[in-house]
Amino acid sequence: MKTSATIYLDYAAATPLDDAVLAAMQPYFSQQFYNPSATYAAAQTVHTDLEAARASVAHWLGAHRSEVIFTAGGSEANNLAIHGLMRQYPNANIVVSAIEHDSVLQAARHYNCREVAVKADGTIDLADLEQQIDDNTVLVSVMYANNEVGTIQPLKDVSQVVAASKSTRSSKLPLYLHSDACQATNYLDLHVARLGVDLLTLNGGKIYGPKQSGALYVKGGIPLQPLVDGGGQERGLRSGTENVAGAIGFSRALDTAQTMHHDEVSRLQKLQRQFLNMLSDSLPTAVVNGAHKRRLPNNVHLTLPGQDNERLLLQLEHSGILAAAGSACSASKEEPSHVLRAMGLSDAAAQASLRFTMGRYTTTEDVIRTVQALASLAN
Amino acid sequence: MKTSATIYLDYAAATPLDDAVLAAMQPYFSQQFYNPSATYAAAQTVHTDLEAARASVAHWLGAHRSEVIFTAGGSEANNLAIHGLMRQYPNANIVVSAIEHDSVLQAARHYNCREVAVKADGTIDLADLEQQIDDNTVLVSVMYANNEVGTIQPLKDVSQVVAASKSTRSSKLPLYLHSDACQATNYLDLHVARLGVDLLTLNGGKIYGPKQSGALYVKGGIPLQPLVDGGGQERGLRSGTENVAGAIGFSRALDTAQTMHHDEVSRLQKLQRQFLNMLSDSLPTAVVNGAHKRRLPNNVHLTLPGQDNERLLLQLEHSGILAAAGSACSASKEEPSHVLRAMGLSDAAAQASLRFTMGRYTTTEDVIRTVQALASLAN
């Protein structure tokens, strides 16, 4: 494959590590390799740097440093939120949207799990949400933006439904709102109080940081059970010698993503419009899935009626264009996407669907070449 | 602190990343950043490289590739072994040695947990082990080599006790042997069939690999429940986009450690002898804790009667020598070490104890300077 000519449009699956992030990590591999729990000054400096990274993450969330738990990635953070809470309430229930990431859905299904319907555009059905929450609900988990179709959920509305339910409930059980922000972090506001969330999942591997880095925001006072017991690192919620380089890289990646997010949203929205405009000219039968307005600026998700997405992906790859049929996590499975199903797409439509996710290095030329290739393949 | 003159003797707490390991990782941060679950050839190459790393780890264990689960470090691997098995048998019990790492002890104590006594030198009491295992025991966990005092456990004998118990039991419950090999990996044979273990924990951060890399060996056919649910990576036992660079770095670090382990054992045993000989001349009251013969070659653990280890550590640090009072994981806690207590040391003796752990870059000069400093401080 001619790497130089490759157009990578699968940024939702993985992002390359930012050079500046790698540079920030590098000292902690070599000179600053010390165990941050050791007592000598050289190790305490590492500990201080780790805590500064934690404070920096907290800053973007409008949170306190002590509310940020570094995890090995987004799936772990989602699992820590769900298992960490639900294991304490074996008779309670958890309410999730039907289009959550597998790491939320599969974890939630260990418990009494209720799945909230979404509308055809992937937006959560707030009336159904209201109905599903009852006095035994302890956790609601609704992702910030969907990894397949890019739909941004109305988190503030979700938060209001949760708050209203909490104010009228007769049980003494707590009720918390968790959101998986893995795909939102590059583009959206993460201020937890503005969003109204109690727990928030972040993932370094999707924001030009290292894979299996990330964090779970846990509002002060929420008791969680750890997934990993031991030496008591991460306030007892994630034992094990800290991945110092990973945490510092993640924090640096988050800084960059959040600092540039307004500019990057504008730039990608233009590319997204261009993609869709060119497409409606050259492939008018293509259907855009997901919300049109409340949508991640980097996501173009299409159904091309009558086409087979696996064949198209291979042909695109031969033209040097890398895209996806669903999420990478489910790419190896044979089942149609649960997200598209929940949005009401038929299995045939799902199998005619493609996901293009743009990123920091996507150019106008990339978009033009992609739509041209797609049109010539699908016409 | 004069870094150039620093003598680092806390290799059991953390090892610097080997330059060759970092070089092996680097491509997977940049050009090869793809998600190994994606379908295009560039991502499948990453997947192939990840599987080659897994096969390489399996090679050193005498295991099959499918039996190696990459984890985010040793604590997670220990937790996966224990919770992953024990959650399936709520009425069963687990038998562990009293001097296990906290990530084993704390995980095991969620269940019906029996702690086996150790002798004064930290070697497991095999008669007590035999007594503690009963028809309801599902898992025995005995560490390969202790992280504080360096005692190497007679794993083959442990395995024989487990096998004998298994052959005579009336229950239909399975019985497995797990061992935490985090501190043994640099110096000892890891062949699982020779050791007679069913589950084995490895940790990259202690073998000049990246922190929060590692693996759990799981003998084929042993069913475990994952700690992290989701996309089904790592045969469903550790969901989340793989830490490709971390796994490849870990595999490379393991290669180096196991390739050089005979030479490194000889070299360090000489330094260890020199340390102890010099010490018995200059500080004859010093007591060496842990087994003398069956001992990691890099570990010198001492009680200096009448001394205060915190004061000594600070004074050693002023002389440019970095050592430890216990394990780094428990360094921040105020309690005396559970390991030393189980070996019969008084709290006063524990508080007069120091751990020196040598490593790949430790020289004769380092040893001479350290013993001289220690003698002048403690006399």
Image: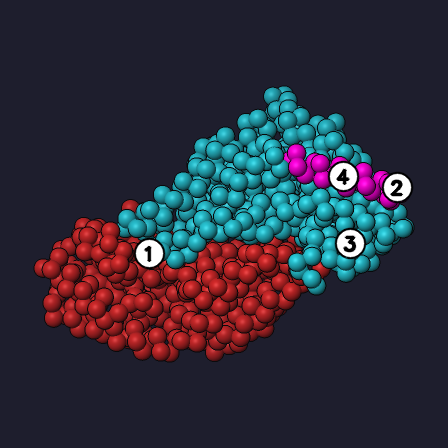
Chain colours: A red, B cyan
Q: Nearer the viewer, residue A25 or B83?
A: A25
Q: Which residue is mark 3?
A: B335
Share a chain, discs 3 and 1? no
Q: Chain of mark 1?
A: A
Numbered disc 4: what chain?
Answer: B
Q: Identify the residue under disc 1.
A: A327
Q: Nearer the viewer, mark 2 or mark 4?
A: 4
- Please state if A138 lies on the left or on the right of B378 as rendered: left
Amino acid marked by disc 1: Ser
**Disc 3 residue type?**
Glu
Q: Magenta residues, as a range?
A: B265-290
Task: Identify the element where label 2 is drawn.
Answer: loop
Q: Chain of mark 3?
A: B
- The amino acid on which the numbered mark 4 sits, given as a three-letter code, is Gln
Asked whether the residues under the numbered discs 3 and 1 touch, taking CB atoms below 8 Å apart as contact, a structural biologist would say no
Dot 4 or dot 3, earlier in sequence = 4
Residue B297 forms part of the magenta stretch: no
Q: Check the image and report above or below for B278 versus B230.
A: above
Secondary element under disc 1, as helix, strand or loop, is: loop
Q: Earlier in the sequence, mark 2 or mark 4?
A: 4
Q: Residue at point 29% right, 46% down?
A: A334
Q: Nearer the viewer, mark 3 or mark 2?
A: 2
Crowd tier of the residue under label 3, counting other residues whose Cα lies within 10 Å: few below 14, some 14–19, many 20 or above = few
